Image: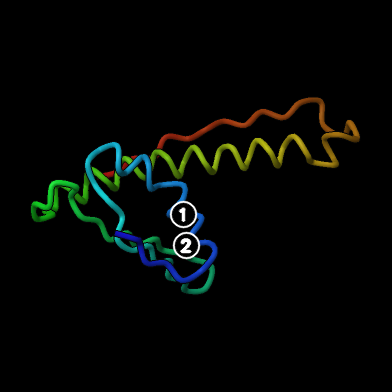
Amino acid sequence: MAAIYQTQLEQKVFDLLEKPVGSIGYAIVRVKIFQSGRSKTLQLMIEKADGENVIVDDCEKVSRHVSVILDVEDMTAAENWAANDPYAKAGLFASCELVQWNKVIG
């Protein structure tokens, strides 16, 4: 079954999450990103690979798994930004340290 997405960003999110979500026994049915001002909300619709009904515990499991993947993706973007920062390249900073924060879910 092909997932439903409408924008390039939604397709990028699907491409990033499809295999990891599949590896824990679920399939992504739909990816939707809602924007309100500066805030964005990601909505994933999932189904179980075995065809059973999805319950809240399944949503929690996928949410926690996806959250870790998206956090890693953000850290990679931050590291790329820091490595290409013209101010750092010009020697205006003695050092730059990126520290990943732990997200508390629940």
Residue 88, picture quadrant: top right
Marks 1 and 2: in contact by CB < 8 Å? Answer: yes
x then y, percent, for residue 102: 42, 34
30 up-or-down from 98: above or below? below
Q: Which mark is residue 10?
A: 2
x then y, percent, for residue 53: 9, 55
**76 or 17: nearer the viewer:** 17
Side of 60 relative to 51 (left or right): right
Residue furthest bottom in the image: 36
Residue furthest right in the image: 90
Q: Disc 1 residue type? A: Val
Q: Secondary structure at mark 1?
A: helix
101 up-or-down from 1: above or below? above
Q: Residue at x 34, y 62 (%)?
A: 43
What quarter of the picture does the N terminus occupy? bottom left
Q: Which mark is residue 13?
A: 1
